[in-house]
């Protein structure tokens, strides 16, 4: 898996898709949010590939060690607030 810091990379969507056809991409935004872009052809293949990926395992280890947590209630509140704003 390749990690791309979006604030540092000049990457358009077409290029990202081309890269993701070769290996999963972890796209990291400046605010710390992360998106995973990968092929969706074969779930078992993808799961096995991620399981074998030392880079992905490292990302999981980093995330589990991070003290930053967002409570579920806060996530639900934000979703409800955004949905209400869309209805207005």
Image (tube, rainbow, N blue to C red):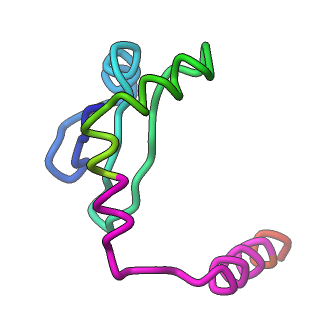
Could you tell me which residue is drawn at 46 percent across and 80 percent down? 69
Q: Which sits in the foreground, 13 or 66?
A: 66
Quadrant into which the N terminus falls = top left
Image vertical order of residue 72 relative to residue 25, above or below: below
36 or 11, nearer to the observer: 36
What type of secondary structure mainly makes up the magenta span?
Answer: helix
| Magenta highlight on residue 69 | yes
Q: In the image, is residue 59 part of the stretch drawn in magenta? A: no
Q: Quadrant of the C terminus?
A: bottom right
Residue drawn at x 85%, y 71% is 87
Q: Position of residue 41 (x, y in %)?
A: 60, 14
Q: Residue 37: x, y in percent?
A: 45, 33
User: Going by the picture, which residue comes out furthest to the right?
Assistant: 87
Report the residue at 34% width, 14% height from top.
22
Pick the front one: 14 or 73: 73
Looking at the image, is 61 positioned above or below residue 48?
below
- The quadrant in which residue 72 appears is bottom right
Q: Give residue 61's position: percent from left, percent from top.
A: 32, 57
Which quadrant holds residue 67?
bottom left
- Horizontal arrangement in the rendering, residue 2 relative to residue 75 (left or right): left
Q: Residue at x 35, y 63 (%)?
A: 63
Query: So how many labels did they put on this image?
Result: 0
Q: Position of residue 68 (x, y in %)?
A: 38, 80
**Magenta-drawn segment:** 60-83
Q: Is residue 55 above or below residue 70?
A: above
Does residue 44 appear to the left or right of 70 in the view shown? right
**Can you say whether 87 is above or below 35 in the image?**
below
Q: Is residue 57 left or right of residue 36?
A: left
């Amino acid at each position: 898996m390749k990690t791309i810091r979006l604030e540092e990379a000049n990457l358009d969507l077409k290029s990202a898709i081309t890269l993701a056809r070769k290996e999963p991409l972890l796209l990291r935004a400046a605010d710390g949010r992360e998106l995973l872009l990968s092929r969706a052809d074969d779930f078992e293949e993808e799961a096995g590939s991620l399981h074998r990926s030392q880079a992905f395992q490292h990302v999981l280890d980093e995330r589990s060690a991070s003290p930053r947590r967002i409570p579920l209630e806060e996530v639900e509140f934000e979703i409800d607030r955004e949905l209400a704003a869309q209805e207005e």
